[in-house]
Image: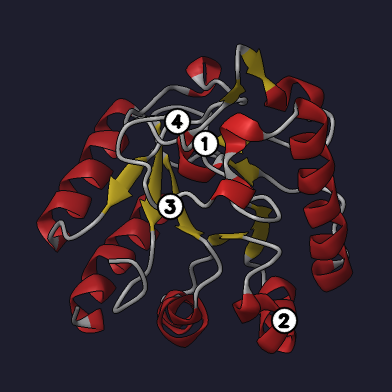
Amino acid sequence: MNLKKWIMPLILLAAAFAAKAQTQVWNNKQCAVVLTYDDAIDVDLDNVIPALDSVKLKGTFYLIGSSPVISKRLNEWHTAAKNGHELGNHALFHPCDGSLPGRSFVSPEHDLSKYSVAREVDEIRINNTLLKAIDGKDKRTFAYPCGDRKIGDVFFYDQLKNDFVAARGVSSGMQMADQVALDNVDCYGINGQNADYLINLVKKAQQSHTLLVFLFHGVGGGHN
């Protein structure tokens, strides 16, 4: 993927924040646009953060605590956080529900359907401790690995609401501020769509004065 083609949408996103709004909801801006990047992959540090910094934007990077990209590039994550990027929690081992269709990639060791709620909660809190050791912060957001919110019939995040500001899901949508479900914030997953697609979503958010969250799994590499 050519990184240059992402610069224009990023500039447009910056403009969304700079424009004057008809409402006071988003700090006198027309909308709120959030850029999120999952899984702690090399291209986040190699491509994404330099691109964001070049247009004075900040991103949220949801880190898997066990990822070798954290241990090998710890100082770079620390610098990113120091420069205003959020380090979010994407669980310690990124467990997903392997009992669902299309989940052959899930290892038996990290199959969420075989977890207890206590294990999932403990691992997420351990990852919070790791992230605090990197950025020194007590407040951050969480992102559900694979968008999975339940173990059996239990919403495990109910036991973590005091540990996080909010949790991002994977369902597409935009909401007004008073409509946002902080335990399952909607987002638009980006995987091969062109710049026009992103720009049109930003324009829609500006017109409707809503929250727009983008989910990336790499820019110029990674999972995309």
Which numbered marker is on residue 99? 4
Q: Is residue 150 left or right of residue 42?
A: right
Mark 2 and mark 4 residues within 8 Å of each other at the beta carbon: no
The secondary structure type at the circle numbered 1 is loop
x, y percent for residue 159 = 80, 24
Q: Is residue 142 left or right of residue 129?
A: left
- Seen at 46% across and 42% down, the residue is 146
If you read the primary sequence from the N terminus, does the residue marked by circle 2 or circle 1 appear first?
1
If you read the primary sequence from the N terminus, does the residue marked by circle 2 or circle 3 appear first?
3
- Seen at 34% across and 67% down, the residue is 223
If you read the primary sequence from the N terminus, does the residue marked by circle 2 or circle 4 appear first?
2
User: Which residue was labeled with disc 2?
Assistant: 71
Decide: is 137 above or below 25.
below
Gap in Å between the C-alphas at discs 3 and 1? 9 Å
Mark 3 and mark 1 residues within 8 Å of each other at the beta carbon: no
Gap in Å between the C-alphas at discs 2 and 4? 30 Å
